Image (tube, grey):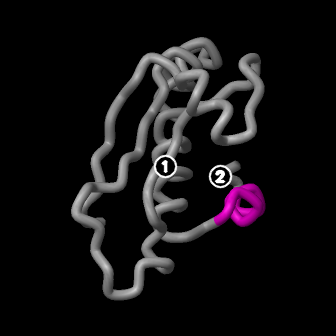
Amino acid sequence: MGNVSIIIADKASPQQMAENGLAPHDVLYGLYDGVPLPERGSYVPPLPDVITIFQEPIERASRSMEELEEQVVTTVRHEVAHYFGFSDNELDKMGLG
């Protein structure tokens, strides 16, 4: 993977929630923002794509350190898969929903 930044934020902003069709009470663990690799062709964007992992919702959903680690791994895999062009429906079928 090239030209991708991974950042950690406390939680998604109201704007991020709205842009992704989510209500304020919905839960968002991570977010991929960029142009998926299969859609780029030969064009390489000058700014990096960004994968954001949201710490607070992951911590709230985890009852143990093991669950927290598993959720972080699942979330990172999910967002990286978006970079490679997989849709949420495809990821659900793969167990990465």
Mark nearest the camera among 1 and 2 is 1
- Give yes or no for contact between labels 1 and 2 (Cβ–Cβ under 8 Å): no
38 versus 14 height, above or below: below
16 versus 88 height, above or below: above
User: What residue span does the magenta drawing correspond to?
Assistant: 87-94
| Left or right: where 26 falls relative to 76 | right
Q: Which residue is drawn at 53% across and 23% down?
A: 13
Q: Where is residue 18 in the image (x, y as percent from the top left)?
A: 68, 32
Q: Where is residue 30 in the image (x, y as percent from the top left)?
A: 53, 37
- Judged from the image, the secondary structure of the residue bearing numbered disc 2 is loop
For the stretch drawn in magenta, the main secondary structure is helix
Q: Residue 66 carries which label?
A: none
The foreground one among 69 and 35 is 35
Disc 1 packing (10 Å; few <14; some 14–19; many ≥20):
many
Q: Residue at x 64, y 18 (%)?
A: 61
Can you say which quadrant of the picture contains the N terminus?
A: bottom left
Q: Quadrant of residue 86?
A: bottom right
> Does residue 91 belong to the magenta stretch?
yes
Q: What residue type is labelled 2?
A: Leu
List the residue tagged with mark 2. 96
21 versus 54 height, above or below: below
Q: Which residue is drawn at 48% across and 26% down?
A: 54
Q: Position of residue 56 (x, y in %)?
A: 51, 15
| Left or right: where 24 falls relative to 16 | right
Q: Residue at x 44, y 17 (%)?
A: 10
- Judged from the image, the secondary structure of the residue bearing numbered disc 1 is strand
Q: Where is residue 83 in the image (x, y as percent from the top left)?
A: 46, 63
Q: What residue type is labelled 1?
A: Tyr
List the residue tagged with mark 1. 32
